[in-house]
Image: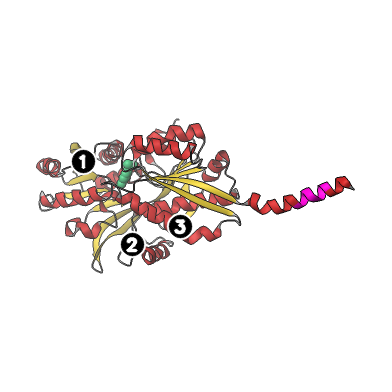
Amino acid sequence: MHMRAVIAALAAVAAMAAPAAMAQTVKVGVINTYSGPFAVPGQLMDRGITLYMKQHEKDLPPGVKIELIKRDDTGPQPDVAKRLAQELITRDQVQLLAGIVYTPNALAVAPLVTEAKVPLVVMNASTPVITMKSPYIARVSFTLWHSSYPLGQWAAKHDIKTAYTAVSDYAPGADAEEAFIKGFTEGGGKIVGSIRMPLQNPDFAPYLQKAKDANPAALFVFVPAGTQAIAVMKAFGDVGLKQAGIKLIGPGDITTDEGLDAMGDVALDVITMFHYSAVGKAPANAAFVQAYQAEFGKDQMPAFTVVQGYDGMAAIFDVIKAQNGKIDPDKTMALLKGWKYDSARGPIMIDPDTRDIVQNEYLRRVERVNGHLVNTELETIPMVKDPWKVLNAKQ
Ligand code: PHB
């Protein structure tokens, strides 16, 4: 009798404790750029994260909660990003990491997530090798090769005989330059000059003057989205390249949707390749834009980092739901490999072999529609894998 009573008492205690034991709060550390001259893409990414949380928190399994712990890396500052990752992992004990706008920061964080086995969902940083730096990294954004390699091929096929390249002097700029030159020259195009522009406090005018003096048919430009994209577009007009008949082309970072109206008419007819346009025709985009404008203002156009933050949260929600809130790092990575989603940019997938994204690339032209400048999609290249990885795959 005594033993039975003890067992019954224990069972009663267990039953009472069960709901509490089942409650799972998953801590997700977000390393993002919230302040300083490089903050625009990060602030927009945060809107995507916020919107997804707001719409889908109710879809989490009973008792499962997500706690986002947000940290500001203040720009391309690898030492800051590394310190924040260290604190999030060791002090806050996050189970997942997400965010990261700038490549140097992602490269600085990669060894830490490998060591601690904390999966990192990269929501922007775009140099191809990032995903190869840790088996615990998956990327929902893009690489510069996704856009710039097919753009080079397109330019060579469309009667552009000569081009000049001008890129920011850091890893993504080097990737954009190399990708464009490869696509363009393989198609028979000729490069008449290439320059790298400083990443910090650039004055674009002297660089664009050099490009103008070389008199190419097209100028290919990559600078980080946000303030610099607006400034380089203004310099393109001020230095008189448009008037000289030089065509501006580049990855969509230089015509981001939220900045187009601020760029003004000089942006008209600029041709870019990219994975998202706010006026894109992917089935999920209309509802996405509507929800975004309901949340952040009728006049606001979502840009690519909004979508990447949103889709990254979709991936995080899916791995949390599949594990009922109990995060195992290896199980998480297995779930991310092959993950598919119907994004506002079109269908996306995480390549199970590389953990990098597979997505449509769109050739776009800046046009004025209903009084606003927009990136009108002209052509679609379906489900592009990072061309750098395809070209450099071990035989
Ligand atoms: C990057 O640092 O990887 C980066 C930042 C902004 C962009 C593209 C790439 O627009």
Residue 23 placed where, x, y %? 61, 52
Amino acid at pointer 2 = Val
The first of marks 2 and 3 along the sequence is: 3
User: Considering the image in quadrants, where does the C terminus appear?
Assistant: top left
User: Which residue is disc 1 drawn over?
Assistant: 165
Q: Which residue corresponds to the image point at 39% horizontal and 64% vertical from the top-left?
A: 295
Q: Which residue corresponds to the image point at 39% horizontal and 33% vertical from the top-left?
A: 392
User: Which residue is disc 3 drawn over?
Assistant: 52
Estimate how packed mark 3 is, as few (under 14), some (14 to 19) or many (20 or more) residues with alpha carbons within 10 Å: many
User: Which residue is disc 2 drawn over?
Assistant: 279
Q: How far is disc 3 from disc 1 in space, using C-alphas?
A: 37 Å
Residue 260 placed where, x, y %? 24, 58
Residue 180 placed where, x, y %? 28, 41
| SS at circle 2 | loop
State which region is magenta.
6-12
Q: Is residue 360 magenta?
A: no
Q: How far is disc 1 from disc 2 in space, using C-alphas?
A: 28 Å
